Image (cartoon, rainbow, N blue to C red):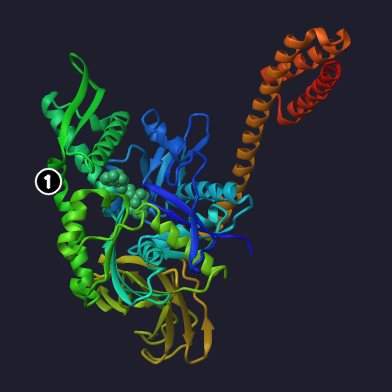
């Protein structure tokens, strides 16, 4: 069995880790793998160039201001979302790329003349992380543990799993981010303790209370907001800057121009970062727009105190969720052993202060907030592949699962914070005589009316023999697996016939669609590899031409005229091929020809000296 890697697929940054072995204390030794540019996290940014090339990571982020429409970031916020959901509406106002309604009602991304699903875009990020791991390990990687916010619902988890499949990764487990963080934190802890994990990242906020005891990690309660994170802090800064700018410049709104918006976004994030260590910073965006009397510039100082006032309500929202979770877990802050900070946003002093005040203690900063989730994922991956002893993770479902009953009421079957895997059965019957089928509508959420919750699937229990109403008894079993993903099975208790309901979600990608994308990805990979090989070959050829020319210039007196002619002929032919854009095979052939004659050249030179 090959290595199983751990991937933190973040809204803003992704990170990949792998188990290297165990250390002297017998504890897992995890390596956070740096990407080709030497960075330990990779921006979750995907861009498409005019030439149809796909860029992922730092290269994609770097060209965002010049190609804003075709640069997709924070796609995690669109995973498993309906086009008209609150989350999508919100993101639409600030995203420089176009979000569209796909025919199934989901939010997709329009790039050039194509529509791409969020799982497909995420798959490009996952594929990049897979490659980072493969380059380090020197072998193909096909299996991974991928993390998601604990508060992700069924559709969002399913979408993440699909993304893995499209990237050519068999997702062994969808692991909750705070649980992964706790795993990384708690491995070397021997005493029994209850901890809180406060994770404020780029797009999501998670708060979980966990109990750790001798390799058993059990989640007591989880909560949060899948649409609260650093992006929202940036948006508040952008809005403040833009509104001031409009007031000062006769209503010119820089957010209307995609390129200006992207520049605003970068400046806002940079200022936010700087204000974590300094008390004041300068924002400077020259030529952001043009007015009636020429170009307009945006320049302004921003104080840490101003940022804190501006974003106070976002931080307060995290505290509301923390109090609710403490309440759900039936624990008071004085009983906690530690509060672990996760996510880049926890570097903001105001966030740390708020956490300290609420929990009445200094938060634990012993783990790197950007890497800890992927480290935990790698530990879980190693446990699943049998490389280390099993760790027992007892996670919970973040949202209740239930069905729609009479009058549109939501009836809970599996309440939130139930330990998974779990299953519940329910008996369904007919409501009129001789009714041949019973419709079932499954939903997820906490609201009392079905319509206010997230619809997961509609299905029909069919083939019910004629009978008076209320007589047929069909037992439906709802199962949530360790990934937090739901499956449903129905059994007619009268006939004893099991009808495995294939629960096709009302949203998401059909499995045929996923298969098609997997194949497309492989094709794309081949052409990507070809392009890379060609570029490398051209580079090698250019180097050989250069060194050969240097050699004949310096040592012409040591060589016979025939030899010189032969070398010059091969040189000319390779040069011509480079100029004409010859294909890989012909280049390679010409390269080895030239290499052959230069080797002879070298032999006679060294023979002569
Ligand atoms: N020094 C800093 N000060 C303030 N904010 C920071 C700092 N460093 C990073 N951030 C912010 O942290 C966020 C990214 O955090 P992180 O990489 O943990 O998120 P993520 O894992 O991609 O997102 P999520 O977990 O929500 O999916 C960004 O909004 C970034 O601007
Ligand atoms: Mg994160």
Q: Is residue 243 left or right of residue 596?
A: left
SS label for mark 1: helix
Say if 134 sits above or below 421 in the image: above
Residue 437 is drawn in which quadrant? bottom left
Q: Quadrant of the C terminus?
A: top right
Judge by depth and name the residue closer to the eye, 190 or 223. 190
Judge by depth and name the residue closer to the eye, 547 or 332. 547
Q: x and y percent of residue 102 in the render?
A: 41, 49
Instruction: Look at the image and tell me whether residue 506 can be seen.
Output: no
Judge by depth and name the residue closer to the eye, 43 or 191. 191
Q: x and y percent of residue 391 in the render?
A: 46, 73
Q: Is residue 88 left or right of residue 173?
A: left
Q: x and y percent of residue 33 in the render?
A: 50, 50
Circle 1 is placed at which residue position? Answer: 309
Say if 243 sits above or below 201 in the image: above
Q: Quadrant of the N terminus?
A: bottom right
- Establish whether ligand 1 lies closer than 8 Å to the Cβ of label 1: no
Q: Decide: few, some or many residues near mark 1? Use Cα within 10 Å; few <14, some 14-19, many ≥20.
A: few
Judge by depth and name the residue closer to the eye, 471 or 309. 309
Q: Residue at x 60, y 39 (%)?
A: 528
Q: Residue at x 40, y 62 (%)?
A: 155
Instruction: Look at the image and tell me whether residue 324 can be seen.
Output: yes
């Amino acid at each position: 069995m090959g290595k199983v890697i751990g991937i933190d697929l973040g809204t803003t940054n992704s990170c990949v880790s792998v188990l290297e072995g165990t250390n002297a204390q017998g504890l897992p030794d995890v390596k956070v793998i740096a990407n080709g540019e030497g960075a330990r996290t990779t921006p979750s940014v995907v861009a498409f160039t005019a030439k149809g090339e796909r860029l992922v990571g730092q290269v994609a982020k770097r060209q965002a201001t010049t190609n804003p429409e075709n640069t997709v970031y924070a796609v995690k916020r669109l995973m498993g979302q309906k086009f008209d959901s609150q989350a999508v509406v919100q993101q639409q106002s600030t995203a420089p790329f176009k979000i569209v309604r796909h025919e199934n009602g989901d939010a997709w991304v329009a790039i050039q003349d194509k529509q791409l699903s969020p799982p497909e875009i995420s798959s490009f990020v996952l594929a990049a992380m897979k490659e980072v791991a493969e380059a380090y390990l020197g072998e193909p990687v096909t299996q991974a543990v991928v993390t998601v916010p604990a508060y992700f619902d069924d559709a969002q988890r399913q979408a993440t799993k699909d993304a893995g499949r499209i990237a050519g990764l068999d997702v062994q487990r969808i692991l909750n981010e705070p649980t992964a963080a706790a795993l990384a934190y708690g491995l070397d802890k021997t005493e029994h303790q209850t901890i809180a994990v406060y994770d404020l990242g780029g797009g999501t906020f998670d708060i979980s209370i966990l109990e750790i005891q001798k390799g058993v990690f059990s989640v007591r309660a989880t909560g949060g907001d899948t649409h609260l994170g650093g992006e929202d802090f940036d948006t508040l800064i952008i809005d403040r800057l833009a509104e001031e700018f409009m007031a000062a410049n006769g209503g010119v709104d820089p957010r209307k121009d995609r390129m200006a918006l992207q520049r605003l976004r970068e400046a806002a994030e940079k200022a936010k970062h700087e204000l974590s260590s300094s008390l004041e910073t300068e924002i400077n965006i020259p030529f952001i727009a043009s007015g009636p009397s020429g170009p307009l510039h945006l320049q302004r100082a921003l104080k840490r105190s101003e940022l804190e006032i501006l974003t106070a309500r976002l931080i307060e929202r995290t505290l509301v969720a923390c109090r609710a979770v403490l309440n759900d877990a039936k624990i008071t802050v004085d009983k906690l052993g530690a509060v672990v900070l996760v996510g880049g946003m926890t570097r903001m002093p105001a966030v740390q202060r708020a956490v300290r005040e609420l929990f009445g203690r200094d938060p634990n900063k012993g783990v790197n907030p950007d890497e800890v989730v992927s480290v935990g994922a790698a530990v879980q991956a190693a446990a699943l592949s049998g490389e280390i002893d099993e760790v027992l993770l007892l996670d919970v479902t973040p949202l209740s699962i239930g069905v729609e009953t009479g009058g549109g009421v939501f009836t809970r079957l599996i309440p939130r914070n139930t330990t998974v895997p779990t299953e519940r059965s329910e008996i369904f019957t007919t409501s009129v005589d001789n009714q041949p089928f019973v419709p079932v509508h499954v939903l997820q959420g906490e609201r009392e009316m079905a319509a206010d919750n997230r619809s997961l699937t509609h299905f029909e229990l069919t083939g019910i023999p004629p009978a008076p109403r209320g007589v047929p008894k069909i037992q439906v079993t709802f199962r949530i697996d360790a990934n937090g993903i739901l499956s449903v099975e129905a059994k007619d208790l009268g006939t004893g016939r099991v009808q495995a309901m294939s629960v096709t979600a009302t949203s998401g990608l059909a499995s045929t669609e996923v298969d098609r994308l997997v194949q497309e990805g492989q094709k794309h990979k081949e052409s990507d590899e070809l392009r890379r090989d060609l570029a490398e070959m051209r580079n090698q050829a250019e180097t050989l031409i250069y060194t050969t020319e240097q050699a004949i210039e310096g040592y012409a007196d040591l060589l016979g005229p025939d030899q010189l002619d032969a070398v010059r002929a091969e040189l000319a032919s390779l040069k011509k091929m480079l100029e004409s854009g010859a294909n890989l095979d012909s280049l390679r052939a010409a390269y080895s020809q030239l290499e052959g004659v230069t080797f002879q050249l070298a032999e006679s030179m060294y023979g002569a000296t």
